[in-house]
Amino acid sequence: MGDHITRPENDFIPALRWEEPPEGPVLVLLDQTRLPQEEVELACTDVQGLVGAIGSLAVRGAPLLGLAGAYGVALAAARGYDVEEAAELLARARPTAVNLAYGVHRALGAYREAEPEHAAAAALAEARALHAEDAEASAAMAGHGKQLLAELVPGGGYRVLTHCNTGALVSGGQGTALGVVLAAHRAGELRRLWVDETRPLLQGARLTAYEAARAGMPYTLLTDNAAGSLFTAGEVDAVLVGADRIAADGSTANKVGTYPLSVLARYHHVPFVVVAPTTTIDLGTPDGPSIEVEQRSGAEVTDLAPSPLGTQAYNPAFDVTPPELITAIVTENGVVSPVTAETLAAVCR
């Protein structure tokens, strides 16, 4: 997959970066499977290694997968691989996250349009442009989301429940949903961040808690099945989550366990907000049932705790929340509410 590089403690480590050492270009990833115990980087020198890193979730999160896809095309071009074949491998590495294919196609389009002697440089320039755009989108979503929180929960002191991980580890900037939470925290308006474990791979317990601790947020970790008791106790002011694909009707695929939170939020009259860039909106997918949901290895479930030999496991990576359960979708272009096909198409324009 690539070489691991251990970084100095307390050094800021971006989730992804491009380097050009004398031996050739390298895409360097913060290996998210090793967090929070170890801050270790993974150096990808070829597309097969990058595809493996995507599959293992060493690199993950919709916006960051878009960047990984774009830089992967640039890596293939710079290293002299078959770029068309590399693009196909990358685009299908994970089926649900639409940003991955989007990033691949952006860089591939730039590669195809350039003169042959400039094609590799064009692909890299497009990947870097997408990286900058994602950082800008992250900042814009944080602003729009913070304003929306003020409207939905007057008086500040927000108690926000989140699921999975949506911060700087999934973005070229500060993230999506966790970027909004960070903006509220920096303004002194966050009372408590409730962090779902997010089983079976514990992206909340490992990654969101890691980011919250580094930012000095007041946060509390809870088991996924404890969320209902929080709602019953009146301890949640808003639910903020990210998205891996948003269909044309507003149906939203996110880490499995998100849909039950939307049902709880509706029953308890708590706002349920999705934060995602417009690159995550797929107007070519008409509705929720049309979203392909990735099915992952059952071993991720059976290995979480010892199970009897031969136990089968149901392990979808995502579930889909229908638009009628979503209070608003926050994008870099503004807030979509109510969530309908018309309002979603308008924000994309």
Image (cartoon, helix red, strand yellow):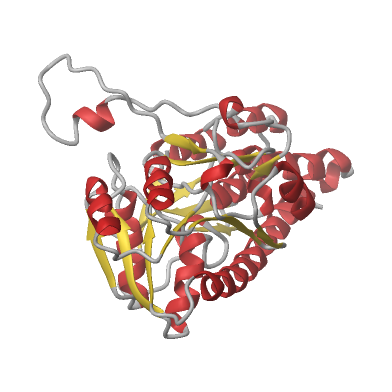
Height in image: 100 above or below 332? above
- Viewer-proximal residue among 132 and 313: 313
Q: Is residue 38 left or right of residue 279?
A: left
- The image quadrant where one finds the N terminus is top left
Residue 283 lies, in percent from the top left, at 73, 38
Height in image: 7 above or below 323? below
Height in image: 294 above or below 264? above
Q: Is residue 159 left or right of residue 205?
A: right
- Viewer-proximal residue among 258 and 47: 258
Q: Residue furthest bottom?
A: 188
- Viewer-proximal residue among 346 and 25: 346
- Viewer-proximal residue among 299 and 112: 299
Q: Is residue 36 visible?
A: no
Who's the residue at 22% across and 54% down the image?
229
**What is the number of callouts on the image?**
0
Q: Is residue 281 visible?
A: yes
Q: Residue furthest top?
A: 310
The quadrant in which residue 57 appears is top left
Q: Is residue 309 left or right of residue 254?
A: left
Who's the residue at 55% across and 54% down the image?
327
Who's the residue at 27% across and 50% down the image?
228
Residue 135 lies, in percent from the top left, at 62, 65
Residue 267 lies, in percent from the top left, at 39, 49
The quadrant in which residue 270 appears is bottom left
Residue 265 lies, in percent from the top left, at 40, 52
Who's the residue at 41% across and 34% down the image?
317
